[in-house]
Amino acid sequence: DIQMTQSPSSLSASVGDRVTITCRASQTINTHLNWYQHQPGRAPKLLIYAASRLQSGVPSRFSGSGSETDFTLTISSLQPEDFAIYYCQQSFSTPITFGQGTRLNVK
Amino acid sequence: EVQLVEIGGGLIQPGGSLKLSCEASGFTVRNNYVNWVRQAPGKGLEWVSVIHTGVGTLYADSVKGRFTISSDESKNMVFLQMNSLTAEDTAIYYCVRETPFGELTFMDVWGRGTTVTVSS
């Protein structure tokens, strides 16, 4: 199975901050990498697919980059609604695997 | 509106069985990938199973031989039959559509989830 490792596991930031979350795959996955936002009590939401493509309806302050094994999710200017847990996920091979999550907290 | 709604969660004793249902609207389960993904308390997301009516089914090793995914195209629903449940199966279970994009896929439609608690 492909292991997905996110860093940091948690992060404290303020509204307006620029935030970057990284995700590393245990083997190359080309750009078969997606990012999700999960707010407790709600359904997870797709933010970025294919490493860098913004899902329809997602604000442009979210962006993704990377390929092969190293990927990043960047939020350019944090908004109050962005405090949540973020997951990366690989779809390169079965079983689909997720990172352990990064909890973005209010500083 | 494209939507998934899960029903059937609850409290079940260890060793028991439970069947989850997922009702799709706004798209057909026929020829689409529909997954179950779970989140145990305090843990991250874990893929459980997938069905595609034209391709077949797959399972995570942790549930293989105990869980069965199926669909009813006439009702536009997907099911997850869970047998021999243990405390480790306690989780919120999400029904999720997975959409192909070239060679890759992404999970673009998620239900709100249904909670399964395995406890005596």
Image: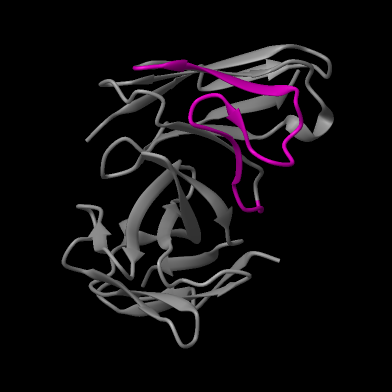
Q: Is residue A107 above or below residue B36?
A: above
- Point out residue A39 in the picture as x, y percentages from the top left corner: 66, 43
In what quadrant of the picture does the C terminus of chain B appear? Answer: bottom left
- Point out residue B25 in the picture as x, y percentages from the top left corner: 61, 73
Front residue of B74 and A8: B74
Query: How many numbered marks does the figure carry?
Result: 0
Magenta residues (range): A41-68
Residue B16 vs residue A18: left or right?
Answer: left
Residue B76 vs residue A107: left or right?
Answer: left
Front residue of A38 and A57: A57
**Residue B113 seen:** yes
In what quadrant of the picture does the N terminus of chain B appear? Answer: bottom right
Residue A55 vs residue B91: left or right?
Answer: right
Q: Is residue A16 above or below residue B88?
A: above
Front residue of A66 and B7: A66
Residue B108 colored magenta?
Answer: no
Q: Is residue A82 above or below residue A13?
A: below
Residue A57 colored magenta?
Answer: yes
Residue visible at 32% across and 56% down in the picture? B88
Q: In the displayed image of the protein, which residue is found farthest to the left?
A: B65
- Point out residue B113 in the picture as x, y percentages from the top left corner: 56, 62
**Residue A100 seen:** no
- Point out residue B22 in the picture as x, y percentages from the top left corner: 50, 73
- Choose top left, top right, bottom left or bottom right for residue B70: bottom left
Residue visible at 75% across and 26% down in the picture? A60
Residue visible at 32% across and 25% down in the picture? A29
